[in-house]
């Protein structure tokens, strides 16, 4: 089962950011939804067998052109930036 952790609108109000995880915490997804046509876009999906739930949810970058999130991509919780259109997040 998938659970929504959080959702929030982009600074310009044109896109909704959705942070979602599986009930066993193994999988995590980050999506955006267009306010114009309600199209869904998967921004990020990650799977980790040893994952624990993060107490901090994904947020828009201040300019609305990317996403900031805490993840455990290298088995440690770190802050990551994922600019719009990027395929891999960057550890901050």
Image: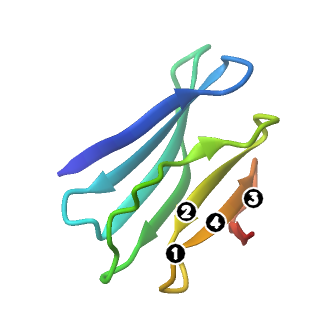
Q: Secondary structure at mark 4?
A: strand
Return the x and y of residue 45 as percentages of the image width and height. 48, 61
Q: Secondary structure at mark 3?
A: loop
How dense is the environment of label 2, judged by Cα within 10 Å: few (below 14), some, or many (20 and up)? some
Which quadrant would residue 25 be assigned to in this image?
bottom left
First in sequence: mark 2 vs mark 1: 2
How dense is the environment of label 4, judged by Cα within 10 Å: few (below 14), some, or many (20 and up)? some
Query: At 48% across and 86% down in the image, what residue appears?
Result: 75
- Taking the image as shown, residue 65 lies to the left or right of residue 60, namely right
Cβ atoms at labels 2 and 1 below 8 Å apart: yes
Return the x and y of residue 53 as percentages of the image width and height. 33, 64
Cβ atoms at labels 1 and 4 below 8 Å apart: no
First in sequence: mark 3 vs mark 4: 4
- Taking the image as shown, residue 76 lies to the left or right of residue 81, namely left
Read off the residue under disc 1.
77
Read off the residue under disc 3.
86
Q: Which labelled disc corresponds to residue 51?
A: none
> Alpha carbon of mark 2 to alpha carbon of mark 3: how far?
17 Å
């Amino acid at each position: 089962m998938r659970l929504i952790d959080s959702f929030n609108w982009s600074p310009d109000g044109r896109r909704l950011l959705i942070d979602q995880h599986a009930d066993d915490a193994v999988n995590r997804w980050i999506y955006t939804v267009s306010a114009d046509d309600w199209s869904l876009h998967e921004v990020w999906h990650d799977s980790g067998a040893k994952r624990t739930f993060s107490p901090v949810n994904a947020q828009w970058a201040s300019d609305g052109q990317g996403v900031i999130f805490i993840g455990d991509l290298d088995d440690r919780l770190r802050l990551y930036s994922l600019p719009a259109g990027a395929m891999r997040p960057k550890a901050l």
